[in-house]
Image (cartoon, coloured by chain):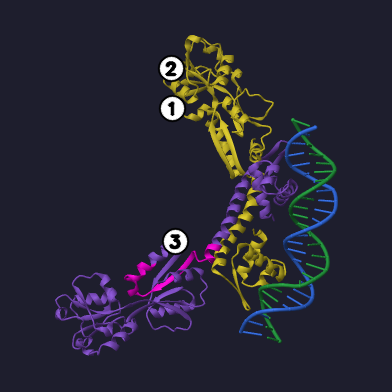
Chain colours: A purple, B yellow, C blue, D green
Amino acid sequence: MFTLDQIRCFVAVAEELHFGRAAERLRMTQPPLSRQIQKLERSLDVVLLHRDPRGVQLTAAGQAFLGEARSLMASTQRAPAIAKAIAAGQAGVVRIGFTAAAGFGLLGELLTTIEHHLPKVTLELSEMVTREQTHALDEGSLDLGLARLPFASDAYDSRLLLAEDLVLAVPAGHRLASTVRPVDVRSLSGVPLVMHSPLTARYFYDLIVGLVRLDHQNVVHTVGQITTMVSLVKAGRGVALVPESARGLRIEGVRYLQLDDSASGVVTLHAIWKRDNDNPALSRVVSLLS
Amino acid sequence: MFTLDQIRCFVAVAEELHFGRAAERLRMTQPPLSRQIQKLERSLDVVLLHRDPRGVQLTAAGQAFLGEARSLMASTQRAPAIAKAIAAGQAGVVRIGFTAAAGFGLLGELLTTIEHHLPKVTLELSEMVTREQTHALDEGSLDLGLARLPFASDAYDSRLLLAEDLVLAVPAGHRLASTVRPVDVRSLSGVPLVMHSPLTARYFYDLIVGLVRLDHQNVVHTVGQITTMVSLVKAGRGVALVPESARGLRIEGVRYLQLDDSASGVVTLHAIWKRDNDNPALSRVVSLLS
DNA sequence: CGTCATTACGGAATGCGTAATGATA
DNA sequence: TATCATTACGCATTCCGTAATGACG
């Protein structure tokens, strides 16, 4: 088998068509260069060069091999650069999971920031609820989650990205729309309430149960998609407690009313990742989280 | 700079994820293998593997580098095969020039034969007259010519491919079509004759002038394309002496009459090539010429 | 005789294998 | 203590550079 040194030597000779000049370019003397070429030819069992006293010419095989040799040299130079970029986290893949609500505004900003600072990092995005995210993080199929509480905190590092207010979504013309703000959460008893599903949106369910004294007669459950809930509000099926970022949905015919202080900053979104994740691109991305 | 041995070692370790098994596969012991990997990492300034007591894992950079390493290995194995095939003449490029008349039948057969026996040899074809072919051979822009006499013979090797009869093309219904065959060439005096141009088809011009006693009053000159000449015959402008292979044109309304022995085998076609041409594919092609 | 490419030879460096050492569960 | 990976060391090989030789105009 030939060596990369032999390839480099051959390319130099093929380009200079002169052993002396090639040796000079390679910072070596002619004899070892000559030997390297001979060795290469012997290992290939092919004559690559015609030696004439006044110079050197490529054989047809040499011409063809020169093309292969050049591409070999190019790969040889590219490979370390790729590895270094990956190791430095400037290139690579980061797999991100996010809850549906995170997609309204924050995710877009995050993606813009990452693509600006780390243009060679590819992002793979999947919408999934918090429980799915922690599971995927554990089995190594996800690098970063944008998740709700609670998550077991000892295996993960996390950063608080957002602490939003809960607001009250009401249909335009609803009697509460004209009351004085902020609305007292206790005044909601008796009003039909569109609720999250306790199964798929446990976080919101628990949060709201802790805030509002529920009158179970008046609760309408949905599958937990905030978009669906706001649509039901618009249709007059009741009112709903939703994160402030739901305003970003821009659904006509729905007003969002500020609630009292007990609903302030209670909707949190965390970035979470495994502490022992060794993806260098992940730490670059994490360092961009404000 | 790293070496190909280091690349091979790394690929083995990355695939086995175990130094011991990788060393076994490479027919060597663990210590040198370990050193090769260390050296590779040091030259790249990148950690490629996580060493754990129970095994080895690839880092993100290692994963990326593995892809590059594999393609490097593939090129390394492909390159000698290409060079050898070229050197053996089983692959490569042969540039062939041919006269227009050679294209009627013989060229097609020749191409079929070459493509059957040397499927990896690429053929570049150009139509050119004999003088252009010899010039192109001299300056090295052509490997093989299919040419008419005369050509300077000492710098070239040649092989006679074809010795055709001259036949007489006449329009259907012409009075000569019903005379006894073979037609005596001397009986043509006084008959309008469609002739080759002495400038661009010198070979045919000289040949026919040597056979027929020309009556200059009755000569119609063309630019030398045999197709054009036969068309003029069909249009009733006269008769023409053309090589037998002109039958291959399959032009309706024209008959081809055998001439006497003085016209037998006088149209020759030679394959010619420079004796010092070092294109290995050329000698393969030449050896296929029957 | 002048220009290149190729052998001849001595010293330095590299690489393998065996044996010993480290590190970790 | 059992399992890997890594250093330690001796020996063979490889490779460079200087000097001599060969081939061709």
* Mark 1 element type: loop
The dot on residue B252 is 1
Quadrant of the image occupied by residue D5: bottom right
Name the mark nearer the viewer: 1 or 2: 2
- Please, what is the three-letter code of the amino acid marked with disc 2? Arg
Q: Which residue is mark 2?
A: B237
* Mark 2 element type: loop
Q: Is residue A48 above or below residue A189?
A: above
The dot on residue B137 is none
In front of the other: B111 or D20: D20
Q: Which residue is mark 3?
A: A119
In this rendering, position of residue C6 left or right of residue B46: right
- Please, what is the three-letter code of the amino acid marked with disc 3? Pro
Name the mark nearer the viewer: 3 or 2: 3
Same chain, marks 1 and 2?
Answer: yes
Task: Indicate the quadrant containing the C terminus of chain B: top left, top right, bottom left or bottom right.
Answer: top right
Residue B124: in magenta span: no
**Inter-mark Cα distance, 3 to 2:** 76 Å
